Image (cartoon, rainbow, N blue to C red):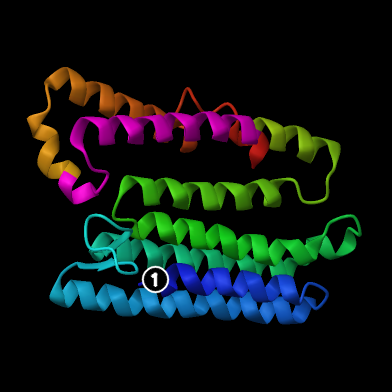
Amino acid sequence: MPLLVGIPLIGAAINLIFGRRKKTQIVVSVASLTAVLVLGAILLVAVDTSGPIAVAIAAWQIPLGIVLYVDVLAALLVVVTSIVLLAVLLFSIGQGAADNDEDTPVSIFYPAYLILGAGIFNAFIAGDLFNLYVGFEILLVASYVLITLGGTESRIRTGVVYIVVSLVSSILFLAAIAMVYGALGTVNMVQISERMAQLPQDTQTILHLMLLLAFAIKAAVFPLSFWLPDSY
């Protein structure tokens, strides 16, 4: 399970080392996402057969440390997303649009793309809210780089708006996580589901609204979608 995040990060590190060798970067990127796709498919079969899997990272036991959790939904999301990421990567390689723009640092594209994937996969298998937050921040940082590649005026202007909106949503998300921990004494999702019913209804509503607002901004849910068209 940790390899779902580790493989793209290792691939990104290798791509940074071979920044001047585009073909090597392409091979590493395609191989990394293909490996994640295979692992995701294996996990999908495993959890569909034997039930969800939870793994505690390092020596910290559940729920104190970082917990990775894969059920059928999480595994399915990993498989579908890795297919989409791989397809988009192959399309970008085949299109070669950036090859004609000498101002665009193509060598940065492949490491940033893999880091983006690592953040997404981490969010899918996160077993606690804080690790989910970390996954979002990883993919957001990578998306900042991808949006501003080339450094043109329009890219920088759009990137600034995107960064400001993302930071606001991240602050709200982090504040919501702190409130959840203050109210329940945990950020582990399983324990949250068990303890939430014990809180007063008003407190539950506030926590739900904070999380809903943070995710609505990140997901560009109307009317909080003003930043999305320019970013695309």
Give the overall secondary structure of the magenta segment.
Answer: helix
Magenta region, residue range = 162-191
- In the image, residue 159 sits, relative to residue 131, either above or below, namely above
- In the image, residue 183 sits, relative to residue 101, either above or below, namely above
Residue 1 screen position, x and y as percent: 35, 72
Residue 22 screen position, x and y as percent: 78, 76
Viewer-proximal residue, 102 or 125?
125
Toward the right, the furthest residue is 102
Viewer-proximal residue, 158 or 167?
167
Residue 74 is drawn in which quadrant? bottom left
Q: Amino acid at mark 1?
A: Pro
Q: How many marks?
A: 1
Residue 192 is drawn in which quadrant? top left
Toward the top, the furthest residue is 202
178 within the magenta span: yes
Q: Is residue 11 left or right of residue 126?
A: right
Q: In the image, what residue occupies the spot 42% across and 59% down?
A: 122
Give the quarter of the figure containing the C terminus.
top right
145 within the magenta span: no
Q: In the image, what residue occupies the spot 24% across and 49% down?
A: 188
Question: Can residue 12 be seen at all in this image of the molecule?
Answer: yes
Q: Secondary structure at mark 1?
A: loop
Q: In the image, what residue occupies the spot 58% across and 61% down?
A: 115
